[in-house]
Amino acid sequence: MIKTLSQRLLGPVTLVLLVLTFWLGLWVTPPDKIQGNLARMLYVHPAIAWVALYVSFGTAAIASALYLWQRTRSVVMDRVAYCAMEVSTVFIILTLITGSIWGRPTWGVWWAWDARLTSTAILGLFELAYLALRRANDDPELRARRCAVFAIIAAINVPIIHFSVDWWNTLHQGATVFTENGNLLVHGIMLWTLFISLFAFTLLFFWLLRARYRVEVLRAARYDVALDEALAQRRREGVR
Amino acid sequence: MIRVALLVAGKDLRIERRSRVLLWQVLPFGVTALVLCGLALGPLHAGNSSAAPGLFYLVMLLVALLMINRAQVIEGSPGTKASVATLGLDPAGVFLGKALALAVELWLTGVVVLAGSVLFLHTALSGTLSAVPSVIVTLAALAAAGTLYGALSGGGQGPATLLPMLSLPAFAPLLIAGERSFSDALHGGSLWRWWVISLVALAAYLAIGILLYGVLEES
């Protein structure tokens, strides 16, 4: 009962938090002293990137690792990995688009060959390749195994993206919310809006993941029904 | 594991030596691609060595894709996987052997393409020679990654088209590191900075291959 209630609440709560994020971000928070209204992108872009890189890709990578581990190997892990990867692909494309929208007025170009941007785009390519690999194999077990290995290899890219701003001289800014010593750089309503946006987009991911997972289960069930029907037809033909 | 690796590498290299595909198809393709790159740049820029490192790695990338596909075709011939399974060969050794054979083939092609870049793209001989250690490591990393991605793409629908899709995102960092270290060698920069990335990538792909190649080859 509690589970059903939480499942029912997930969508509306996500929607309310997203509306709250946009209201706070667009009307309540003040413009930045240096960047002006452009700083409002801070309430969208980092939250989307957080979901793309850490929450959704992390879910896909962990589910893939659990699939490869004999004790936890199950079709559920494979489906979670696939669905999370698909959602992550959408979020990584949104990360690149929102980053470009911010980059054009700030850097003067839509795209810069910057270490953070390039490594993020490479992760996006990895995710598209994962989806291609998924469609290239018909055998469910072989497909699951190959995709799990591929997701783990792709996961190497995440720490590279995270530390790229420290390892190389980049146009992309470094840590924005906290300093290296853990002191806050953003305060007041701007900080709250930022945290609410992170929470809202994280919930949005889980809502999308749940919806996508249900579609995947239904699709698998439909495939099974179609297979049973085909087998039954062959049997009838054999009897005749 | 090492014994199995040497056996598999020997087998793959013997197949290459007998078929002469490397000599009569891959090497001419590499040189042709390099000449075409020069033509695409035009006579004014083709002789400018600043483009040479990137073109070298681009050609080697195309060659690597050809070689990986070919290695998968050899491995996919009827009965090969069944015989490997029957013999009980260590999958980690098989991976290392196939990666070693591919690396040797890429090194041989690399020598010819490097000579071509000195001839056609006018890279300084001394700078090119000082880039050789980084080229060896980067091509070995390409071979390790390529062997892994070859196994991932094999057997499914359209493996020849799937392979570039799977491997190019992984090859991109190697391409960047290789190109930068080659450029540093030509222009007297710090050799170590980018070479370390290729070394780390090589170690990472070897470790992943040793751990997971068996999972990919499970029937």
Image (spheres, coloured by chain):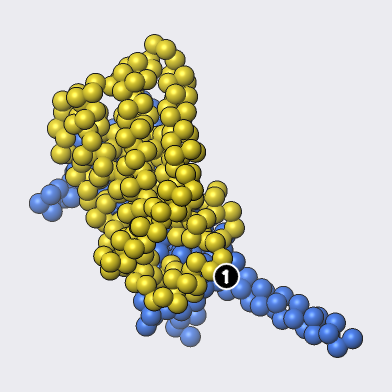
Location of mark 1 (residue) = A139
Residue B107 seen in this snapshot: yes
Q: Which chain is yellow?
A: B
Q: State the image coordinates of residue B31 (x, y, percent, origin top left).
A: 43, 29
Q: State the image coordinates of residue B51 (x, y, percent, origin top left).
A: 34, 23
Towards the viewer: B148 or B11 = B11
* Residue A94 placement, left or right of B197: right
Tell me the residue at 72%/75% (across/down). Answer: A226
* Residue A237 placement, left or right of B206: right
Tell me the residue at 28%/21% (across/down). Answer: B123
Tell me the residue at 55%/71% (across/down). Answer: A140
Count of marks, rendered view: 1
Q: Residue furthest front?
A: B18
Three-letter code, disc 1: Asp
Q: Chain of mark 1?
A: A
The answer to whether residue A232 is above or below residue B211 is below
Dividing the picture into quadrants, the one containing residue B50 is: top left
Q: Residue furthest top?
A: B44
Dividing the picture into quadrants, the one containing residue B181 is: top left
The answer to whether residue B1 is above or below residue B45 is below
Q: Which chain is blue?
A: A
Towards the viewer: A107 or B20 = B20
Q: Quadrant of the C terminus of chain A?
A: bottom right
Tell me the residue at 49%/48% (across/down). Answer: B19
Q: State the image coordinates of residue B180 (x, y, percent, origin top left).
A: 26, 33
Q: State the image coordinates of residue A119 (x, y, percent, origin top left).
A: 33, 44
Q: Secondary structure at mark 1?
A: loop
The answer to whether residue A75 is above or below residue B154 is below
